[in-house]
Image (tube, rainbow, N blue to C red):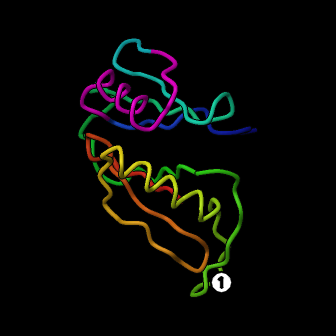
Amino acid sequence: MIEGVGSVAVLVSDARKSAAWYRDVLGFEVLSEEGHGVFVRAGGRGGVLIHLCARCEAWEGDGPGGRTGVWLRCGDVRMGRDAKTGALIPASDPERVERTYNELKARGVKFSEPLTTTSWGEFAMFEDPDGNEFEIS
């Protein structure tokens, strides 16, 4: 059976250039730079791998940019309850999310949605240089 997520692919225009941004701005570790793709990881050995995938045959009609659906946590996961729906939603400690938001803004990261406080915690959406959007919460 499935035991976890191996990696998440994010389409980029230049994998090596993107890897440098993920390393220098987000603090990710660059694990490999081979072929059309580069693997980076946040959070040390237990972090999910992100495959920065430059143009290749597998793209077909896809391209970089848009919402990835990737949530980047800013610490331990805690569950908060959405006041509107009653659903439990995973999030990081709001103080750590706010600190991360401010650090990334200071590094020039572009946010497509600013830091927003909700009933279950705080979140914001930022973009990488190719316009791929990620959530911090």
Amino acid bearing label 1: Gly
| Residue 59 drawn in magenta | no
Going by the picture, which residue comes out furthest to the bottom?
84
**Residue 21 position within the rendered picture, expressed as x and y whole percent measured from the top left:** 35, 31
The image quadrant that residue 64 belongs to is: top left
Specify few, some or many for label 1: CA neighbours under 10 Å numbering under 14, 14-19, or 20 or more.
few
Q: Residue at x 61, y 80 (%)?
A: 82
Residue 137 as seen in the image, left or right of residue 66 = right
Answer above or below: position of 62 versus 99. above
Report the residue at 65% width, 63% height from top.
90
Magenta residues, start to end? 12-32
Q: Is residue 20 magenta?
A: yes
29 to the left or right of 102: right
> Residue, x 36% and y 52% (percent of image)?
105
Q: Quadrant of the C terminus?
A: bottom right
Residue 83 appears at what percent x and percent y? 61, 86
* Residue 41 falls in image quadrant: top right
Q: Secondary structure at mark 1?
A: loop
Residue bearing mark 1? 86
Residue in the foreground of this view, choosing between 27 and 19: 27
